[in-house]
Image (cartoon, rainbow, N blue to C red):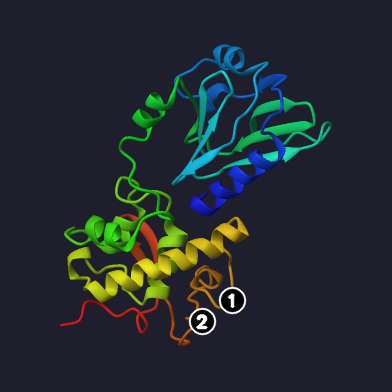
């Protein structure tokens, strides 16, 4: 599932290859990824204009169109944005192709759970993002304490709740909690100030490394590099990893490094 680092990678792809280029054509191969706009109207609004400098909030990619609307992209569970040369073989999951003078920008998505929207202006962008929490990479330690400190839910559930904190998914949440030595099934109210400070520090470190790599890296020294092993062992202490569900999400943790709530 694309998370904050993946979407930051998509933002870099667009910024490097497409900003300032004239949109010559928009080929909609599957209009099921369009949200709130018809294929013909999307093409009318974009053709002949240029992409401006993109930004990101959590898992959302925000792309202003010069002298036009704002393109909003969400990648759901399987979406991606790729730059391809002319004549490249079309992938069966390519859904929308933005044809530019120097190549093509492809929105590719297998499951089509989210997609592309147009907002008329920044006000409409804010309406779309109104129920989204602050970006996980930008949140301060004090903000994180305010967001989590009084919640009764489990900390893993809070971290992946986009209305609380934007950008984290399963891989990032498990990795951050493992590095912070916090059990994912502890409630937010059970976290001490030291726990929250450690959680914030590890969140920033994991996100910065992942953003640099354009994904959550499967490093052998990280939980991510072992979570799919069955049963798998903790890369820090060698204990057998635990696997379960927390807040409806598949969760992996180390029972020794991440003990339950202290008595």
Q: Quadrant of residue 160?
A: bottom left
Q: Are marks 1 and 2 in contact (CB under 8 Å)?
A: yes
Q: Residues within 10 Å of mark 2 (few under 14, many from 20)?
A: some
Residue 185, located in which quarter of the rendered image?
bottom left
* Residue 235 visible somewhere in the drawing: yes
> What x and y, as percent, mark residue 242?
39, 75
Residue drawn at x 42%, y 74% is 179
**Frontmost residue, 229 versus 24:** 24
In the rendered image of this protein, does residue 163 appear above or below residue 52? below
Residue 83 is situated, as x and y percent measured from the top left of the image, at 72, 39
Q: Is residue 24 left or right of residue 142?
A: right
Label 1: state its secondary structure: loop
**Residue at image location 53% in from the left, 54% down from the top:** 5
Q: Is residue 173 above or below residue 2?
A: below
> The C terminus is located in which quarter?
bottom left
Where does label 1 land, which residue? 220
Find the distance from the CA under tag 1 to the CA under tag 2. Answer: 7 Å
Residue drawn at (45%, 87%) of the image: 237
Above or below, 259 against 127 in this view is: below
Q: Which residue is mark 2?
A: 235
């Amino acid at each position: 599932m694309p998370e904050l680092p993946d979407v930051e990678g998509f933002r870099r792809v667009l910024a490097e290859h497409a900003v300032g280029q004239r949109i010559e054509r928009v080929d909609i191969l599957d209009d099921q990824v369009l949200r709130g706009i018809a294929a013909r109207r999307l093409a009318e609004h974009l053709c002949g204009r240029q992409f401006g400098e993109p930004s990101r909030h959590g898992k959302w990619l925000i792309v202003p169109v010069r002298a036009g609307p704002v393109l909003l992209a969400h990648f759901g569970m399987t979406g991606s944005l790729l730059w391809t040369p002319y004549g490249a073989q079309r992938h069966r999951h390519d859904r929308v192709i933005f044809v530019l003078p120097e190549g093509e920008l492809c929105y590719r998505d297998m499951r089509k759970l989210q997609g592309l929207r147009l907002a008329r202006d920044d006000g409409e962008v804010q309406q779309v993002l109104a129920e989204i929490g602050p970006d996980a990479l930008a949140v301060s330690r004090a903000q994180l304490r305010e967001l989590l400190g009084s919640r009764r839910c489990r900390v893993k559930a809070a971290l992946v709740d986009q209305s609380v904190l934007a950008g984290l998914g399963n891989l990032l949440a498990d990795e951050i909690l493992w590095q912070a030595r916090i059990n994912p099934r502890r409630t937010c109210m059970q976290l001490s100030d030291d726990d929250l400070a450690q959680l914030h520090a590890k969140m920033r470190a994991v996100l910065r490394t992942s953003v640099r790599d354009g994904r959550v890296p499967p490093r052998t020294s990280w939980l991510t590099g072992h979570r799919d092993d069955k049963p798998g062992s903790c890369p820090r202490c060698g204990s057998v990893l635990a696997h379960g569900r927390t807040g409806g999400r598949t969760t992996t943790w180390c029972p020794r490094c991440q003990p339950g709530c202290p008595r």
